[in-house]
Image (cartoon, rainbow, N blue to C red):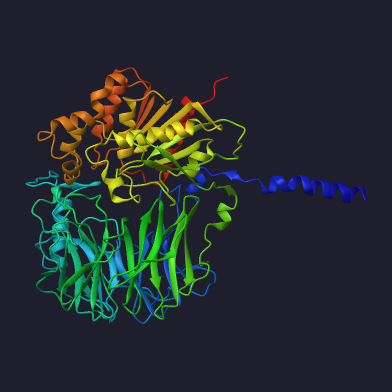
Amino acid sequence: MLRTTCALLFALTAAPLIAQKLPFTAQALLQINRIGEPQLSPDGKLVAFTVQSIDLPANARPRHIWLVPLEGGAPKAITNAGSTNMRPRWSPDSRHIAFISDRAGSAQIWIMSADGSNPKQITTLSTEADGVTYSPDGKNLVFTSDVFPDCPDDACNARKLEAEKASKVKARVYTNLLYRHWTAFQTARRKHLLVIPAEGGPAKDLTPGPRDVPPFSLGGPDDYAISPDSTEVCYVMNPDADLATSTNSELFTVPITGGESKKLTENPAADASPSYSPDGKYLAWRMQVRPGYEGDRWRLAVMERATAKTSLLTESLDRPITGFTWTPDSHRLVFSMEDRGSQTLQMIPVTGGAVRALISGASHVDDIQLTPDNKTMIFTENSGSKPVEIYRISSAGGSPVPLTHLNDALLSRYQLSPLEEVTADSTDGSKVAAFIVKPFNFDANKKYPALFLIHGGPQGAWGESWTYRWNAQVFAAAGYVVVMPNPRGSTGYGQKFTDDINGDWGGKAFDDIMAIVDQTAAKPYVDPARLAAAGGSYGGYMINWMLGHTDRFKAFVSHSGVFDLRSEAGETEELWFPLWEFKGMPWENPEMYAKWSPSYYVKDFKTPTLVIHGELDYRVPVGQGMQLFTALQMQKVPSKLLLFPDEGHWVTKPQNSEFWYGQFLEWIGEWTAKKP
């Protein structure tokens, strides 16, 4: 009896220890399986998707294709060769999957049976391949490749590539702007759309010429589509003369066999993400209406192909459209939109009318696809406390059913805190929202340091979505009350709220952030003497602005932040951005550049600051970080400079990411530590 009692006592005392959750560290973050690219088979029975894992010792991110039955069952990997297998696309009969793989040493198109067997290489292009898509009749594959525009075939491309490699002269010569973009300099090659028979053969260039097709990513779905009768391809291209100052992109069509392209749209702003209705009667796409403004609201447009009559279906909906799909009967469109930190799902008739909410709540819903009988929909969902998983739901309603559980076992060991939304009144009376994540093992009777994260853009937003960079759960696990304000400029709160930052970068947005700071500092569990703030891109700009305008914080982290607006305008690549935000170039509007440039307030810098920058960052070039660090050092402000020679605007390599989190937390920990 004594032994039984002791055993029972041990079980009762040990149970809480077994159930104890661990803090969610950067190392835990790097163990997550990253799900993407779900593709429902045409017969509605299977879902192919990709899973990217992190091999930290190898500093690699291998990606493979998986399969899961729509009706449920254990997902399984169907590729294992090579390090990158992605872009699964079903054949119309659901028997095969085309995909991009590097298993033969370069990125090429492969086709395999639906279960992953019998892989066959389709392309052997010297310029490699990407973006593969089956034509609806299954006869052709449309894809992208970076080719030499004046080359008629791959033999010519191969010769030119070999000549480039052999040349000892590595000089670059340019005669126009946008000669570099994000992390790469423009070369003699251009991205083109090509077509190849599905069984293999010579590839044909569908978009010959000096333009990239499609252009740089516009932040949505594919920027090309094939008509249901497989006769033409609709694609996006920017036709303007000066690409560095233009946000224009137009829709064009070209026969799938090649030939002359036809321009469909005449909108001087952006048109993107074309998609044909299943019956072929309509073409839908996302569009903006203000040229030169990449923060303009995305609308959903539809053209009746027979008459070219175009309608804006969501003009009265003051929220940006992020993606969409057709219902199988071509009568309606299901679309996702950004709304107050969430991404919700709505439906609207093709002829316009009332919008019907399908899925809403504190999450981010994406990748919508419907079965041919319209009875079932699949989608991905994630939140600020849960990474992406794939779900199915009945079109008649009911609760979503998860099809994947790839991270459940891992995440069950860690404490992940839900996001809490709060609002505060700014100085002009505007309501400003923010999300709060409470620290590991939160105790309301204790006082914690607070970390404010300022988002980039500035036309962007924090919200109920999972992220691998600037992950709030990692910061909360380190013991901080993490606060993510959505000040003026943020998206999802109405276009006026977004527009209010134009020409006012350090004005209302700064007031909004400080209103959230005041509210947070007054909370009983926050220590107002231990506040820190950090941000990247525009968020880095705001940190640099705060350096000269407040002494409320113990420490700052400025990542890829704009320091001097004048020199930034001369260094950055997408010139439409400063042209819109500051109403011209520095010599055209010097007063505004001087008014909002943090570099004019260096004498007021006092807060210890960690400066982080990628040397391959061409959006906010590394000189901005170097100038900031020089200013801090010359002002004798405690500061540290962290440079990544192999990273751009974002830190993405696994070991660099781990190091970034470590340096970040070490810095703010040093300055916000509770003094004895």
Residue displayed at 42% across by 27% down? 555
Q: Position of residue 65 (x, y in %)?
A: 42, 66
Nearer the observer, 365 or 632 = 365
Which quadrant of the view contains residue 548?
A: top left
Q: Position of residue 89 (x, y in %)?
A: 34, 71
State whether residue 433 is above or below residue 331. above
Residue displayed at 29% across by 56% down? 219
Q: Position of residue 407 (x, y in %)?
A: 53, 57
Tell me the quarter of the image containing the C terminus: top right
Which quadrant of the view contains residue 262?
A: bottom left
Nearer the observer, 324 or 507 = 507
Residue 534 appears left or right of 170:
right
Which quadrant of the view contains residue 373?
A: bottom left
Residue placed furthest toward the right: 1
Residue placed furthest toward the front: 429
Residue displayed at 43% across by 42% down? 434
Q: Position of residue 11 (x, y in %)?
A: 78, 49
State whether residue 565 is above or below residue 297. above
Q: How many marks?
A: 0
Residue 439 visible in the shown view: yes
Residue 193 visible in the shown view: no
State whether residue 74 is above or below residue 665. below
Residue 204 appears left or right of 11:
left
